[in-house]
Image (cartoon, coloured by chain):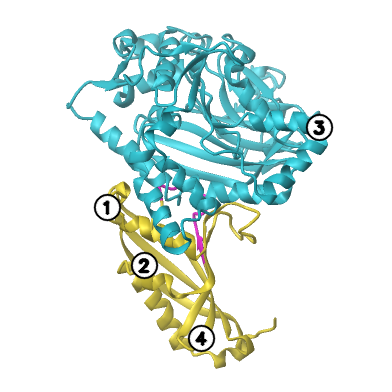
Chain colours: A yellow, B cyan
Amino acid sequence: MKGSASETVAFEYDKIRDFLNFEARLLDQRKFDEWNALFTSEGMYWVPLADQQLDPVNHLSLVYEDAMMREVRINRLRHDRAWSQQPRSRTAHNVSCIVIEASYPDQGRVIVGSSFMMSEWRSFGLRTFAGLYTHDLRVSKDGYRIAEKRVDLIDSEGVFEPIEVFI
Amino acid sequence: MTQATLPVVDIDALVRADEVHRDCYVSPAVFDLEMERIFGQAWVYVGHDSQIPAAGDYWTTLIGRESVVMTRDKQDAVHVLYNRCPHKGARVAPEGCGHVKGLFRCPYHAWTFNMDGKLRGVPYREGYEGTAFDIEDPRFSMKKVARVANYRGFVFASLAEEGVSFESFIAGVKSSLDNFCDRAPNGTVSVAGGVFRVMQRSNWKVFFENLNDTGHPIATHESSYRAARQYSNEKLDGEMPFQLHIIDGNGASPKFWSDLDLHAFDYGHSYMTAIFNAPEDPLSKAYFETLAEAKGEAAAREVLAVNRHNTIIYPSCSPHTSFQQWRVIRPISPDRTLVEIFTFRLDGAPEELLQRTFIYSNVVNSPSSIVMTDDVHVYAECQKGLETQGGDWVSQHRNAGQDQPYEGPDGGVIGVGSSELPIRNQFRAWHHYMSESTTPQAKESGS
């Protein structure tokens, strides 16, 4: 697999930025089904536990979820007896510093880095998550699809209260 | 005197045979006394020696309010020291896991210490000539905690010079520590994959009570087991892959829970028989082969026949022997508890088994667990309710008076799976520790 920044011209930066903003907005609007549909069928949502973690299989992760586990999480978030979702989490994302880290036009693949902050309000108050996103995107006829969304929290090895929604 | 500065707490008035007073959970004076009398006396889990495999390795943690560091020296001995420089008091070892080249060096004035805490060097030596300073005097070395025990790699420490031996303390649940290790073809286990850290807005005892509480899963975890079943029914024709199977287990019938056995022992320990049968998929069979090769088939079957859910080693940790999880409970304040979750490799087992262990841990013990979040929520709700004037007593009546002495392996007391036996048993130990008016530790600091 070869790629270089010079080839990024094949991808339209504005569309990628719009896609990342759209994705974050779906989460903030609790449109979880639409959000989940942005992934490829094998797509993974990954929040590593360690700094610079290379491997989601041979190490613990804060989250490593496929389509099934994301959907179960979504089912739970909607359940009337999701006790810890009373009141429901409300979130606001900011995505910025979007850069195209690598592109593979022949494979319809582009890897996008960005910074984010997510504020979340829930029963115990307001808290903030911050970190770096790495989106491994595929171009399809329906637009971009997520093969992997990696969320590197700056405090991934710190102490957490339960995390319920997607970051 | 230490004793005179402590508020008066009438321990006998707080604990009855089948209920306890809410002050046990919310009173700062009770919490202070717990730090002295329970965490100042009991054998408290420090860490596993695989976290410090080489000379110069260290791991910092808490025993009650005491910042301590577990170290390994060049002779391969493991030490537990108070993490405090005898000079100005700075913590010598940085937080967490790390390595130093043979000696600690205080970041403040560069006093250096061997891994056993012995003072090695002091800058400006000439300035100490003619003073009371003596490099050989133990009070100028890092202080060792009073007693340390290392059982098959699991390191426990007691801050009290005197008290029950580790062997007597652990007797009831020693079989769980053995089973934890015996499941490894090599007979040893090692910490792997990182540490989850979860803060709970509740008293440490609330979490301990939950660990063997079979009354809560069907109510507390309804959202997650319903979500798993919904997916299974809609997308998989009712099939339950491993992750969904784990989540689904909480929705078992009351009869299922009642039919489990609860075993309770002295010093607050207990364990529950397993919720899940040993899996029989290809990976489990491959694992069994490696275990049978190492031990012989009969011995391997015997090891796997000991199938338990949570074991409680009061007041500091809870191993899950079948899925190699180890939860460590650190009280922070009356309404804050830090839980650290470690995952272990069974040395000599197929690497895929560890990968499955990580999957289990990701589902059940991650801060992002869709199961645990409802637990942590109800713990906080308990804490908030107990802080009100709505009632002074907390019920432990379920199957009270029905516990029976157990004549089988490990002895102790047995109760039906739905019993609140483990909770009553924890408070029996709590009362025992809290009634000890002084410890050698307290005497020393009060003199």
Q: Quarter-wise, where is residue B437 in the image?
A: top left
- For the residues labelled 4 and 3, the Cα–Cα distance comes to 55 Å
Q: Is residue B262 above or below residue A94?
A: above
Q: Nearer the viewer, mark 4 or mark 3?
A: 3
Q: Is residue A14 above or below residue B421?
A: below
Crowdedness near tag 4: few (<14), some (14–19) or many (≥20) residues, C-alpha within 10 Å: few
Give how far across and how far down residue A8 sits, in percent. Answer: 57, 89
Give the residue pinned by disc 1.
Answer: A80
Which amino acid lies under the numbered mark 2 shown in the image of this protein?
Answer: Phe
Mark linked to residue B296: 3
Residue B114 as seen in the image, left or right of residue B363: right
Give me the chain letter of mark 1.
A
Marks 3, 2 in one chain: no
Residue range highlighted in magenta:
A150-162
- For the residues labelled 1 and 2, the Cα–Cα distance comes to 16 Å
Which amino acid lies under the numbered mark 3 shown in the image of this protein?
Answer: Gly
Mark linked to residue A32: 2
Crowdedness near tag 1: few (<14), some (14–19) or many (≥20) residues, C-alpha within 10 Å: few
- For the residues labelled 3 and 2, the Cα–Cα distance comes to 51 Å
Give how far across and how far down residue A79 sits, in percent. Answer: 31, 54
Give how far across and how far down residue A88 sits, in percent. Answer: 28, 56
Marks 4, 2 in one chain: yes
Give the residue pinned by disc 4.
Answer: A140
Q: Is residue B348 in sight in this rendering?
A: no
User: A151 or B9: nearer the eye?
Assistant: A151
Give the secondary structure at mark 3.
loop
User: B130 or B288: nearer the eye?
Assistant: B288
